[in-house]
Amino acid sequence: MKFKILAVITFLLLSYALYQGMWAAPREATMGDIQRIFYYHVPSAWTSFLCFFANFIASVVYLARRNLKADAFAVSTAEVGVVFCTVVLVTGPLWARPVWGIWWTWDARLTTTLVLWLIYVSYLMLRRYSTGQATPTLAAALAIFGFLDVPIVYMSIRWWRTQHPQPVIAGGQGSGLDPHMWTAVLWNWAAFMAFAALLIWVRYRLEIVRQQLDEAHALKAVGQAEGSFTR
Amino acid sequence: MSSLAAVTASNLRKDLRLEWRSKDAVNAMLFFALLVVVIFSFAFDPTAEESRQIVGGLVWVAFLFAAIVALNQAWMRELRNQVLDAYRVSPAPANALFMGKALGNFLFISVVEALLMPLFVVFYNLRPVGPAWQLVPVFLLGTWALVVVGTFFAAISLRTRSREVMLPLILFPISIPALLAMVEATTMILTGTETPRFWMTLLLVYDVIFTTVCLLLFETVLHAE
């Protein structure tokens, strides 16, 4: 029931955010309508970063408490985080091509996001290839490495390439958004967060079922082994 | 503490003795890196000036690939005759095993680097413009950065299907900032354009952070069932 309520809320939020981004927000002066991709690009980025942060917390909790629910939460947030990060990496070039004239540039924030994506894809690969009971522990260890790596990546790439667009939202004088644009961004962010929560919920339930199934298989195998032993 | 140091030393001695008798890791790395050096010089065919610009990248790519060869073998030895299982049930500190292994790998890879650097100088007509002695701290810090995380991740990839493939897949993304720092610092020293102080600090920070994390988490990973 709660799930259906969240689904309805998500649907309503996404619809209203679409209206906000496509119609209510003013047209940008120099970029024109292409700038509206901003309402998808930036909220996706914030959502994916929050997912990765949640993954880190869940991994630490798993290592401290050995609670399989924390592990299920860690998988779900990492997968959904990678999905939203992919959205960022796809919408970015789509926006950059008409505005900057290039699809991609190796600047600090683009590169950091790409490395972030690589790190969490490698996390998912490890989970995919790892077998047996050790998977949650190994994955949690890797998640901690990955999360601690992000600030180092950011520092290094910032030093390496510092020529790119200044932060628009809080970048000092002359930066800043039209209040209507702010409204559109925040509505879209709320909608994307609700959508991410919905996806994480579905994935989490799936993972819990998978864990129960694994456990049942293991118990059955043990039962058969014991049966053949006594016979 | 003394027992930690003592067990680390005996682990290291054992690895060094095994390597001294077989020379498996060092030989494989040497030949592999040599092949990379030759293939790269076919691929780029640089002039002396160009080679100063690109060798920083080539050197580290060659050593990174060579290190993967050694790191993959490092824990395999412990699987034979269930040495790792024996270690798990013994009261010896897990970190001693890790440090012994990491120091061993560090020595092997450093030896390979020391032997191959002259080859890079010969094949690429290298003449560093900046102060060449600075390459020593860069190589020490950079090699430790690769080895400490690499040894830890090799212990992780040991538990997966297709182990040998898994190690680079998890090691490379995490190592990107360290690799960037090594390449940039080496290039700066070779071309003598800027001082590599920032990159050396970054490598040091990377080393300190990840050595700490490895030591904190290794026992957990070793005992993961």
Image (tube, rainbow, N blue to C red):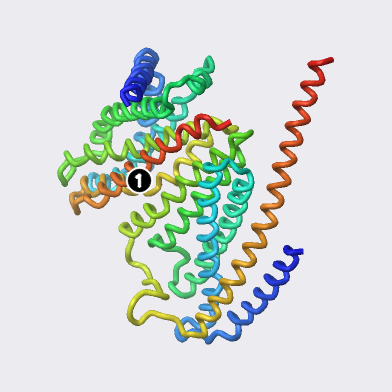
Give the camera-side residue of B35 and B5. Answer: B5
Q: Position of residue A26 (x, y in %)?
A: 53, 87
Q: Quadrant of the N terminus of chain A?
A: bottom right
At x 53%, y 35%, the residue is B165
- Read off the residue under disc 1: B178
Q: Chain of mark 1?
A: B
Q: Is residue A182 above or below residue B5?
A: below
B67 left or right of A95? left
Q: Residue furthest top?
A: B21
At x 48%, y 20%, the residue is B87
Q: Position of residue B76 (x, y in %)?
A: 49, 23
Q: Position of residue B101 (x, y in %)?
A: 39, 26
Number of marks present in the image shown: 1
Q: Residue A39 is drawn in which quadrant?
A: bottom right
Q: Is residue B78 above or below residue A79?
A: above
Q: Position of residue A112 (x, y in %)?
A: 43, 57
B34 left or right of A58? left
Give the camera-side residue of B79 and A33. Answer: B79
Give the camera-side residue of B1 and B99. Answer: B1
Report the amino acid beneath label 1: Ala
Give the camera-side residue of A81 and B7. Answer: B7
At x 32%, y 36%, the residue is B143
Crowding at label 1, few (<14), some or many (≥20) Cα neighbours within 10 Å? many
Q: Is residue A10 above or below residue A76?
A: below
At x 31%, y 23%, the residue is B2
Q: Quadrant of the C terminus of chain A?
A: top right
| Element marked by disc 1 | helix
